[in-house]
Image (cartoon, grey):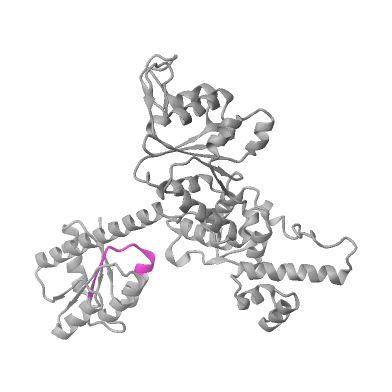
Amino acid sequence: MEKILIVDDEKNYPTIIGEILKEEGFIPITASSGLAALDILKQDYIDLVLTDVKMPGMNGIELLEQLRGMKPDLPVIIMTAYGSVEQAVEAMEKGAYTFILKPFDNEALIAHIKKAISIHKIVQENSMLRDAISSRYSFGNIIGKSRPMQDLYETIQKVGPVSASILIEGESGTGKELVAKAIHFNSLRKDEAFIAVNCSAFAETLLESELFGHEKGAFTGAAAMKKGRFEMADKGTLFLDEIGELPASIQVKLLRVLQEKNFERVGGTTNIQVDFRLIAATNKNLEQEIKEGKFREDLYYRLNVVKAVLPPLRERQEDIPLLINYFIKKYSRGQKMPSNILKGVTPETARLLFDYPWPGNVRELENMVERAVILSPGDYITPNDLPLKLRQTIGSNLQLDGIPENAGLAETLAAVEKKMIQRALKLTDNVQTRAAKMLGISKSGLNQKIKKYGL
């Protein structure tokens, strides 16, 4: 049921209107002033505001202006016993849905409310649809501005329109399936199916049935014919994750499908033609697997027409702030009230997250942020909000690579200082004021050190 906020300083009017609204199945909520209405709107979801114009303190037009800044799409109906053409024009210009005069006809009021809510729902649905389409046909869920990520975006754009097989390499947790989906939804097959299979999730016999399907009675338990993933991906894209785990017997059959574009279901004799684009992903070094006799060389070259490499998070540290902000917004929706949504991380936390090696990559970072969104009591994520194993790395990640073993203390400290300045500049997008604050020095002091180290 929709909630209607009635804002009026008169004692009787909100009660009367509330009873009318209840009879129509609405939930009335009342506020005696504009400020009280704003407090309610910060704490509760409201479908429509019905407000008087003449009220002490903040009047209805001023409340309307505040609402346009807070909730631009929220429908507002202005009501007054002191109506004038000028007020009506002003209210409509400032975004009111309509303007009615007291006393009003009850049926007319309900009709206005129902129509305003109906239009509001359509606007919301269209907005959600636009967001979904924008996310689906873009790189919206792949976050990063580092050079390796820019190279990856360029690869996605180039390979999207063609049907060549693609091999995505990257450690676990780097987001290989996201890249596969981005390639699919930027391809000519975007309106067809995207079918994903994790090759490590099935035993060999089950995987064969999963990929090729089976005929009724092909084996014990095969009570009906089942289509396999190859058939389901016809005209679309088949994504085989963890391709390095594919058993040798399935590798042979996959190679034949890629060459001939046809196959037979398990227990069947009918040739089934298929047209799909294959994207494979692995966290293994397939060339090494070939040397060890674990992966077919001919299949590797069939898969590796185009290679996309996903860098581990530790090699694109400048993307960490972007990812953190993205995940904070993602997990704050539905987890926290609008007044208590996290704003970011403290400088100490940022330094810690920047230095942490992230063995679980983006997936580990996402889990950490989700945990902090749920548990953090303040506006910012602090080191205390992080998992214990991450907090224990404080001070243990100082890398002295590149510093000669016989270097003196002054030389070593200078090298460490230079590295800290470089890190602070990366974390703050080269905004020197913010970098200086993070380092605990003045902006002029930072400027001098930047010149000193030729940064």
137 to 102, vertically: above or below: above
The answer to which of 25 and 292 lies nearer the viewer is 292
345 inside magenta stretch: no
Residue 95 location (% of width, % of height): 25, 75
Looking at the image, which residue is at 24% across and 58% down? 122
The answer to which of 179 and 9 lies nearer the viewer is 179
The magenta stretch is 40-51
Determine whether, in the image, residue 443 is placed left or right of residue 208.
right
Looking at the image, which residue is at 45% across and 48% down? 183
Residue 425 location (% of width, % of height): 64, 71
Residue 259 location (% of width, % of height): 47, 29
Tell me the quadrant of the picture where the N terminus can be found.
bottom left
Tell me, yes or no, if residue 84 can be seen here.
no
Tell me the quadrant of the picture where the C terminus can be found.
bottom right
232 to 445, vertically: above or below: above
Residue 399 location (% of width, % of height): 77, 59
42 inside magenta stretch: yes
Looking at the image, which residue is at 64% across and 28% down? 294
The answer to which of 200 and 254 lies nearer the viewer is 254
Determine whether, in the image, residue 136 is placed left or right of residue 103.
right
Task: Give the quarter of the image for residue 29.
Answer: bottom left
The answer to which of 325 and 418 lies nearer the viewer is 418
Determine whether, in the image, residue 104 is placed left or right of residue 379.
left
Tell me, yes or no, if residue 434 can be seen here.
yes
Task: Give the quarter of the image for residue 266.
Answer: top left
How many tags in the picture? 0
